[in-house]
Image: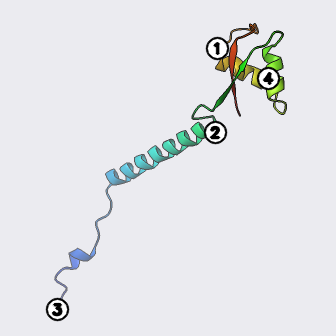
Amino acid sequence: MYAPACDYALKRPRPSHTSQVHRLAIGLALLCLLTFVLARSAFGGAPGAYETVTVQPGDTVWSIAAEHYPQSDTRVKVDEIERDNSLFGPELHPGQRLKLPTS
């Protein structure tokens, strides 16, 4: 005699297949964004600061790298200096200015 009149209102509708797909797509997009941000920070996002040196007679890229980065692998620093200054060989000229990464 006193049956609940709004029994249907107590039951929540089940999520549709489409909403599950949307959640999955959003989750994957966030995962891709997080991966991109972490990779960018790990492999150098913003260019660092540079120090400028003037090449003296007898200087080589190797000698400059060894002098300015005694605790680092000189080969790696030579590659960085050549790349940052668009050098296509070991030839330097006295008075030439080179930018050296500070880190």
Label 2, on which residue? Answer: 42
Q: Residue at x 64, y 14 (%)?
A: 86
Does 38 sit left or right of 24 as displayed?
Answer: right
Callout 4 crowding tier (Cα within 10 Å): few <14, some 14–19, many ≥20: many
Q: Amino acid at mark 3?
A: Tyr
Element on which disc 4 rests: helix
First along the sequence among labels 1 and 2 = 2
Q: Nearer the viewer, mark 3 or mark 4?
A: 4
Q: Amino acid at mark 2?
A: Ala
14 to 50, vertically: above or below: below
The image's mark for residue 65 is 4
Alpha carbons under labels 4 and 1: distance apart = 16 Å
Alpha carbons under labels 1 and 3: distance apart = 87 Å
Q: Amino acid at mark 1?
A: Ser
Does 70 sit left or right of 12 as displayed?
Answer: right
Q: Residue at x 79, y 27 (%)?
A: 68
Foreground of the two, 85 or 58:
58
Label 1, on which residue? Answer: 86
57 to 50, vertically: above or below: above
Does 26 sit left or right of 16 as displayed?
Answer: right
Element on which disc 3 rests: loop
